[in-house]
Amino acid sequence: MGYEDVYRRSIDEPEAFWGEEARAIHWHVPPRQVLDYSKPPFRRWFVGGQTNLCYNAVDRHLPERADQLALVAVSTETGTTREISYRELHRDVNAFAAILLRLGVGRGDRVVIYMPNMAEAVFAMLACARIGAIHSVVFGGFAAHNLALRIDDAQPKLLIAADAGMRGGKVIPYKPLVDEACAKAATPPPKVLIVSRGLDPAEPKVAGRDEDYATLRQAVGDEQVDVAWLESNEPSYLLYTSGTTGKPKGVQRDVGGYAVALALSMRTVFDVAPGQVMFSTSDVGWAVGHSYNVYGPLIVGATSVLYEGLPFHPDAGIWWSLCEKYGVRTMFSSPTAIRVLKKHDVDFIRRHDLSKLRYLFLAGEPLDEPTAHWINDALGKPVIDNYWQTETGWPALTLLPGLDMKPVKFGSPGFPNLGYRMKVIDEGTGAEVGPGEKGVLVIQPPLPPGCMTTIWNDDARFLSSYFSHFKELLYSSLDWAIRDEQGYTFILGRTDDVINVAGHRLGTREIEESVSGFPAVAEAAVIGVNDELKGQVPVVFATLRQATEEPHERVRAAEGMRRTVEQSLGAVARPARVYIVNALPKTRSGKLLRRSLQALAQGADPGDLSTLDDPNALEEVKKALQRGPEAGN
Ligand code: AMP
């Protein structure tokens, strides 16, 4: 059957379709009902079924593939490679689960994980899944403020942190950030487990709170821990993502639906069978890391390659040498990473034997055509643009080479994935737009298995953030899109104030709040401006409490803003440029005209200015742009 037929069946007969797909995973108790949609848009998949992500990812493979590699964790930062078989993974995950139990973590408790791409991060996630604890991995590049916000929302019983991460050979100690976050948080975790790689031995322990992984690991030995059988709809994990407010949203995922969606996608999208190898360059702190570095490949009994380090260190051939060494079949990365590699000689790719490599998938941000062409020519393999969101958990728009390879059209991530009932609609009328017309990309609920079930502890925010934009009950992706005559969808950017920096999703409001935390600042507007390498970069326009024309003071203030953002949110959010102005363009009702600012900063038409309160503000911005930034370049 071709894509069209399978897709139609997934949409027209979802219960029959997903009922069959559910057989791909192990159920301790099979589901009673495939879909409960009695409270739209909330839906429950595989009701009454009992299963466990860890069991499906690890235990289930022991009879057939105990000695096969499950995980290869390569770090070009620490210079280590760990090849871990399913048997070893089972042993380490059990030991980690035993440690969690000793630290008082139980079913339904939250555990925040703050670690880079190292094997113990994977053990920790699977150990949580094993005992029914809810993990929330926080990207290691985020700083103390971000970590504190997530701690206060998730209220974890335990925080697991590495002693440090490394980037480009530089040690980035995590422990001081953990201590700062715990001090800032209203409800700090009672226990902190430090997994030390000996990178930052100097940090003192907080008595009664801090525990040492190596000591506990020795104490538990080869202890085994029973799997907690969870109802399919119990939460498996939370993953925080940026929205339009300063408070991140805890995207909540279930157990059974997620496992079934991942198993299906490993076959139909990524075309990876048991025993084959997948290499995703994502960080475990992102949605791709959860789904295709950890759960997806392991659920199907494949080998997952996890990488810590820069893509061009020790040289720009490192990823391709790993593809060669481990016989990687499917590789998954981001457009930004490829743009970085594009600066290096193509021979770094060509000199490797990539005969086993079948596809390169790229996700997380728009894939520009020059980059797609470059890597396609260099590899001579299909380059597949993948559109998804933290919320969806698996690709929403894609080609499905494991099912039916359609021609790649550069600039488009392709077609709706199985189970996704997608439309492009007019923002005002809600009517479906025709081919070639711009509209908002929406998903008609019920959302397929694998997508978020709600926002942690906040059903009302789930409804208002995603389902309140149109008269009809529809999930808004908050992305503009266009469809061509053949049904290929093109993504045109966000409808909200979220920006995408090197594939990292940041809320401009979060950055504005952080900039405003710098004492000299009266008010700030943050926008995303196109950048050749990173896709977009944050740019600040700020007014000062005490206006000054003194260049040194202006530079000092601007540098202070950049530092403040870096310290509170992390280096990913650091503004590329800061402009100091005497007024910001606002509407008469006081709303910042971010879109006009963005247009001006990119040399485009600022659009409808009829609501502008003070025309001088716009002139101010134009002058500032001509003059150049006070900080950045
Ligand atoms: P995140 O939740 O961090 O993965 O960010 C999701 C957002 O990234 C989407 O809403 C899009 O704006 C953007 N995005 C992800 N994948 C793509 C893609 N393939 N093409 C264009 N934009 C993308």
Image (spheres, rainbow, N blue to C red):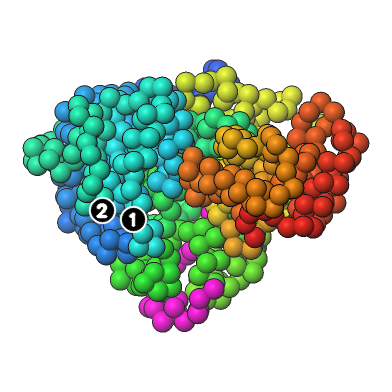
Badge 2 is on which residue?
199
Badge 1 is on which residue?
171
Image quarter where the C terminus lies is bottom right
Q: CA distance from mark 2 to mark 1?
A: 7 Å
The amino acid type, in three-letter code, at marker 1 is Val
Report x, y in % for residue 543: 71, 39
| Residue 78, numbered circle | none
In-image side of 254 versus 479 (left or right) = left
Q: Are marks 2 and 1 in contact (CB under 8 Å)?
A: yes
**For mark 2, does the 10 Å Cα neighbourhood hold few (<14), some (14 to 19), or many (20 or more) residues?**
some
Query: Residue 464: within the magenta?
Result: no
Q: Considering depth in this image, is 578 or 304 the residue closer to the camera?
A: 578
The amino acid type, in three-letter code, at marker 2 is Leu
Q: Is residue 55 above or below residue 626?
A: above
Element marked by disc 1: strand
Q: Earlier in the sequence, mark 2 or mark 1?
A: 1
Question: Which residue corresponds to the image point at 57% horizontal and 19% vertical from the top-left?
Answer: 460
Range covered by the magenta-colored residues = 343-363
**For mark 1, does the 10 Å Cα neighbourhood hold few (<14), some (14 to 19), or many (20 or more) residues?**
some
